[in-house]
Amino acid sequence: MEILDYDIAVLGSGIAGLSAAIHASVESKGKLRIAIVSKLHVMRSHSVAAEGGISGVLYPQHNKDSEKLHAYDTVKGSDYLADQDAVDVLVKNAPQAIRFLNNIGVPWNRTDNDRIAQRPFGGMSVPRTAFAADKTGFFIMRALYDELIGHGNIDVFHEHFATSLVADKGNVHGFVTFDMADRSVKAFKAKSVIIATGGFSRIFGFTTNSYSNTGDGTAMAMRAGAALKDMEFVQFHPTGLVPSGILITEASRGEGGYLRNSKGERFMERYAKSKMELAPRDIVSRAIISEINAGRGLKDPVSGLEYVHLDLRHLPKGRIDERLPMVKELAMKMLNIDPATEMIPIRPVAHFTMGGIHTDINGNVVHGNGSLFKGLWAVGECACVSVHGANRLGSNSLSQCSVWGSITGKEAAAYAQRAAPDPDRFYSIAQDEEAHIADVIDNKGDITPYQIRDELQGIMGRYMYVFRNMKGMARAQQELAGLRKSVARMHVADKGSTYNTNLRDAFETINLVDLAMVVTHCALNRRESRGAHVVIEHPKRDDRHWLKHTIAYLSQSGVSISYLPVKLGEFEPEERKY
C-alpha cells in the first residue's frame, strides 16, 4: 500500500470540490500541498451535466432584486425547513461567487449592454439565474479545471475509488482508495479532508443522475460516525425525458415552455395559478403525477411509463437554438423529436438530494454525538448545511457549491496550517481497509452487485416516489432490510487488476443500499407532508410537531434518529401559495 502525504485532500471533483481546492490554494498562497481525488476523470464529474444556471443578486437596481428577496424565495421554496442563517450566507456570497467564475472565464450569456444575462427559474420572484446557454455546469467546470492547472501545489488523481475514511476518535486523517488503472491500494494522508462527492439519486432507477452518483462520500462519512441530516427529502425534477430520465432543464420553462396534458391543457393553472410552470419543483412534480393519476397522461409504448408533454413549439426558433441548444440536441438524438415542431414527453425524475452529511454553517462535519469532527468538511450536494430544506429551488445548487466551496476551502487551509502531525495509527487503520477491499474481491457469494442494484431501484421506485404512503414506506423498509442482508452474499466475478469496474460497482452498491435504508427510515418517521416529502395519510405540513431537522446516524442497533430545531430568522413559516 502506498501512502501519499498531503496537507489537504479533496474527495470529489465537481464544482464544489474544484472550488474548494482552488480557494484553499489561494488562502494558503500556494504553500499547502493539495490533492484532488476523483473516481472519474475530473471533467466527467456530474457537475458537467448541470444545465440551467446559478442564482445570485447581480443587478438589484436593474431588476428590482435584493438579497432579502432571494432569501425569502429560498426559505419559502424550502417549505420553511431551511436554516435561515445559512440562507443568509448563500444570498450574500452568491454574487461574488458568480463574479469569480466570470473572472476565470465562464462564457455567460449576456444582454445587449453586456450584463450577465439572468433568466427566470421556478420559485424565484425575479429573473435571478445566470446561465451559459443550457450547458452552465460544463462551462463552469471547464473554467475551474483550467484555473486549477495554474496552481502548481494542486495534484489531481483521476480514477481513484475511495472506500473508507481514516478516522480515529473524532479526528479524520485521510482516506483509502484503489487505483482503477491497476487496483493498487493508496492511502491519502491529510491534515484536512473535504468530501465533495455529490448526491445519491442513483438509489432510484429513473433519475437524471450519472451512473457515478452513488453517494460514496456520504456513506463513508456515516460509517465513520458522521450524522446525516434530512435524508427523507429527495427532489424529483418535473421534466425528465421519457423513457431515459435524462434531464430537460428547468430553463426550458424559464424561457417560456408550457406543460400540457393529454387533452392539450396547460394544467398548471389548477395547481399554481400565479406561477404556472415556474412554481417550485415539488409543486410541479406533484401536479404532473396528479394529472397522470386522473387519467390525463399518455403512455410510452416501450417502457410503459406515463407522461405529459413539455411544449416549446410557440418559442421563437432562434431562442431555442441560442438558449436551449442542449434540449434540442437531446430531444433529437434520443427521440428524433424537433422541439420547435413537436412536444417532448416528460415525467418527474429523481434529481437532487436535499439531505446529506450534517455540517455546521462553515461545512465542518458533525459527529453523531453532536461534536464537530476535527479535520473534516463536506461541501456541495453531499452536504446538508441546510439551505435547501425540504425543497431546493432550481439554480441555488450551483450557488451552494460555489459559495461553500470557497468557505470550506479557506477553513480547511486554516486548519491544515495549524494542525498537529497525524497519529502513528494511520497506517494500521489504512491496512485494515486494505484487507477489507481484499475480502470484497474474494467473497464467495451467489448474487451480483447488479441484481442487488436492480432490486434496490425497484423498491425505491415503487414506494418512495413523488407520493408516498405509510404502508408502502414500511414495506420498503422491510424489503431493504432483507436486501442489506443479501449484500453479504455479493460476488465480484472479475478478479482482474486493470479497470475492475465490477469491484467498483460492488462498493457503490453497498453505499446505495445503506443510504436507501436511511432515506426510508427517516421518511417513515416524518408524519407530515413538507416539500418533496409527501405522505398520503398526512397531507398537511405540521409546523407544531415537525418544524425540525431529522438527524440520522449509525448506532449499535442500526440507524438511529434524533431531531434538531430549524434555525428561524426574519421569515416566519406561513402557508405556501404560488
Image (cartoon, rainbow, N blue to C red):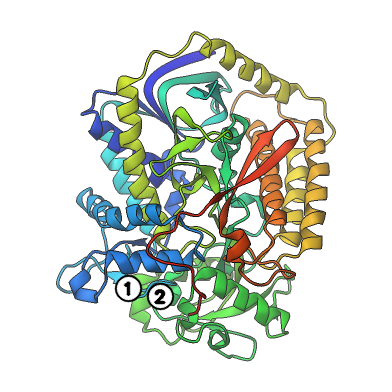
At 33% from the left edge and 36% from the top edge, which residue is drawn?
Answer: 409
- Residue 477 or 541: which is nearer the viewer? 541
Q: Between 448 and 4, which is closer to the camera in this rendering?
A: 4
The x, y position of residue 220, in whole percent, is 58, 33
Q: CA distance from mark 1 to mark 2?
A: 9 Å
Please rate how many residues cluster around mark 2, counting C-alpha atoms within 10 Å: few if below 14, some from 14 to 19, many from 20. Answer: some
Residue 505 in sight in this render = no
Residue type at mark 1: give it: Pro
Q: Which mark is residue 36?
A: none
**Image coords of residue 447 (percent x, y):** 82, 37
Residue drawn at x 40%, y 44% is 361
- State the mark number for residue 127: 1
State which quarter of the image contains the N terminus: top right
Observer able to see residue 387 = yes
At horizontal 76% and vertical 34% (from top left) the residue drawn is 557
Task: Specify the quadrant of the image occupied by residue 309.
Answer: bottom right
Position above or below: 422 against 132: above
Taking depth in this image into account, of 174 and 64 the one nearest to the observer is 64
Residue 254 numbered mark, or none: 2
Q: Is residue 40 above or below residue 33?
A: below
Query: Mark 1–mark 2 contact, CB under 8 Å?
Result: yes
| Residue 293 position in % (x across, y down) | 72, 79
Left or right of 407 in this view: 331: right
Position above or below: 355 against 127: above
Instruction: Give the secondary structure at mark 1.
Output: loop
Mark before the other along the chain sequence, 1 or 2: 1
Q: Most extreme residue toward the left, as rendered?
A: 113
| Mark 1 residue crowding within 10 angstroms, few (<14) / some (14–19) / many (20+) | some
Q: Along the horizontal axis of the image, is 371 left or right of 287?
A: left
Amino acid residing under circle 2: Gly
